[in-house]
């Protein structure tokens, strides 16, 4: 799946992410649809480093910088200070590649 296909699927009418996505990508899909709670649930259930990366992003989006820092550390990623939209794109592209 390409980045554009992923982004388009999140704006479609289907209430479910495309099949075959990792938990981390499912979380980002729900986030793109404005469902932070479902996104957070998916990220919590994905115990991989990718899931921790998305979990960090979601807590940063929520404004909980301390918790985000913990999850960036678990993911082995530096804390991000740029725009949330740029970070979302970066994570999606990395996880799709």
Image: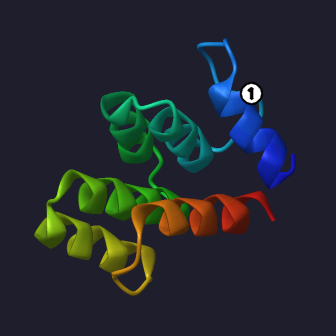
**Pick the front one: 10 or 37:** 10
Q: How many marks?
A: 1
- Which quarter of the image is occupied by the C terminus? bottom right
Residue 39, relative to residue 94: is it above or below? above
Q: Is residue 97 above or below residue 12?
A: below
Per the image, the residue denoted by label 1 is 18
Residue 63 image-quadrant placement = bottom left
Residue 61 rendering spot, x and y as whole percentages: 29, 56
- Name the residue furthest bottom: 78
Chosen colour scheme:
rainbow
Residue 68, percent across and down? 24, 67
Q: Residue at x 53, y 45 (%)?
A: 28
Residue at image location 14% in from the left, 60% down from the top: 64
- Residue in front for this viewpoint, 31 or 76: 31
**Percent from the top left, x then y, of residue 87?**
50, 68
Residue nearest the observer in this picture, 60 or 71: 60
Query: Foreground residue, 64 or 44?
Result: 64
User: How many other residues sit within 10 Å of disc 1, few (<14), some (14-19) or many (≥20)?
Assistant: some
Q: Secondary structure at mark 1?
A: loop
Quarter-wise, where is residue 60 in the image?
bottom left
Does residue 9 appear to the left or right of 65 in the view shown?
right
Q: Residue at x 33, y 81 (%)?
A: 81
Which picture quadrant has residue 59? bottom left
Residue 47 screen position, x and y as percent: 44, 54
Q: Residue at left 41%, top 63%?
A: 84
Residue 33 to residue 25: above or below:
above
């Amino acid at each position: 799946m390409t980045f554009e296909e992923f982004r388009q699927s999140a704006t479609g009418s289907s209430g479910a992410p495309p099949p075959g996505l990792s938990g981390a990508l499912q979380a980002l899909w729900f986030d793109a649809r404005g469902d932070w709670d479902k996104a957070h649930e998916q990220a919590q259930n994905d115990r991989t480093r990718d899931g921790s990366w998305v979990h960090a992003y979601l807590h940063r989006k929520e404004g909980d910088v301390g918790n985000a820092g913990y999850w960036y550390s678990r993911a082995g990623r530096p804390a991000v200070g740029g725009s949330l939209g740029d970070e979302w794109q970066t994570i999606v592209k990395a996880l799709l590649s």
